[in-house]
Image (tube, rainbow, N blue to C red):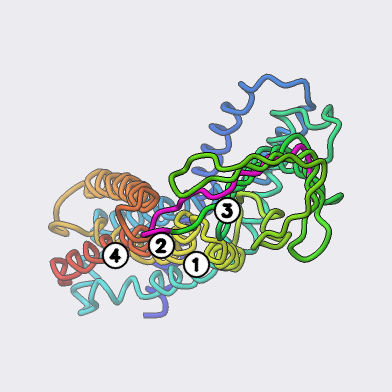
Amino acid sequence: MKILDRYITFSIIRSFLFSLIGLSLVFIFINLLDYIKIESSQSKKLLYLSIYYSIPQILVFVTPASIMFSSTYVISSLTQNREYVAIFSSGISFYRTIAGAFLFWILLSISLIFFQNHVVVPFNKISQKYINEYKKNLKKMNHPKEIIFQMNFKGQNSYYYINYFDPIKKMIWGGFSILQFKIVDQLEIPTVQIDAESANFKENHKWILYKVREIIFNDDLGIEKVNFYLEKEIHFAENLDFFLNPHKNPYELNVYELKKEIEFRKKYSLDFTIYEIQYHALYSFPFFCIIIGIIGSISGNIGSIRSGSPFIRSLLFSTLVIFLYQIIFRLGINLGEAGILPPYIAGWGPLFLFFLFAVYLIYKHKR
């Protein structure tokens, strides 16, 4: 069996690498065509660097399709060439012949977990930085890149709107609005609205607001009193780290950063749904590679082993499977973001559906 294991396993690995490179080049070329349409006076070098740092993400994206096509191609070729007739005649089962490939898919899935968190996510951040510079001409802007623009936050008992926030100087410029509320019968009832021209963080939870207008509401939401101050000290329930944390892109965070972000948002009563969905998706996606390998192998050997030209049939089947997975995966994320599905179902649901499908194929394909 060592010769047969090497023959089938290395054939699948070679085909996988060929598919991975080919599909990656296709998507790189597609991204390049999309990016060159962007009109910018910035150097094209930024564009090419963005494409270069997006390659790890593309590799991960096309991995399931590469596994599917390679497994389908190798197994269907063995079936078409009647090699599986000889294998089955020797008393060797179909699943024993793909044992080496199955081990490869497991190792690949484990590697993807590490690769996504320690390579893809850091490279995504760099790629996004370069494409943003290319699109927005940041070199011509006269402000530091760390400044946070026009952010809305919800705290423990207040809503905040910040126009410009410089975290280095710990200053808010161009307007700072606070709407404080109290909870009555699970409803948020406004109590005080504070508008300031600027603000300066001092220590702990203390801020100094400048040119302040304070509107106090009564229980009927009528205006009870309006106060004006040139300078007013105010304490918020949230510390400075709350204001330093803008809305981060969940696709630029690894599982450790996602977990930290989820805890942060829970602490300040912020919506964390999309971060929790991505957290589960980062774990579920690598395991899909194992399932898709099994489905691809079985599809390559589906039907009578004496039937001719199984490759076209299995290729169409594998293409349909990849297409359906992308649809179901996107649908699950959208339903999760809309609050229709719990985040863990949105992240793991597509994998579970295809796992059931793989079990069904294994049950039907008893060879």
Cβ atoms at labels 4 and 2 below 8 Å apart: no
Reading the image, the residue beneath label 3 is: 158
* Mark closer to the observer (4, 1): 4
x and y percentages locating residue 220 in the rendered image: 43, 45
Residue at mark 4? 352
Sequence-earlier tag: 3 or 2: 3
As drawn, is 365 to the left or to the right of 254?
left
In primary-sequence order, the first of circles 4 and 1 is: 1
**242 sits to left or right of 26:** right
Which circle's residue, 1 or 3, is located before the other in the chain? 1
Classify the position of the N terminus by image quarter: bottom left
Q: Earlier in the sequence, mark 4 or mark 2?
A: 2
Badge nearest the viewer, 4 or 2: 4
Q: Tag 3's secondary structure?
A: strand
Per the model, the C-alpha gap separating discs 3 and 2 is 45 Å
For residue 320, above or below residue 42:
below
Picture coordinates of residue 264, whole percent (x, y):
59, 64
Local SS, label 1: helix
Query: Which residue is depicted at the point 47% across and 61% down?
Result: 276
Q: Are the two marked residues, 4 and 1, in contact with CB atoms closer than 8 angstroms?
A: no
Kind of residue indicated by mark 1: Leu
Nearer the observer, disc 1 or disc 3? Answer: 3
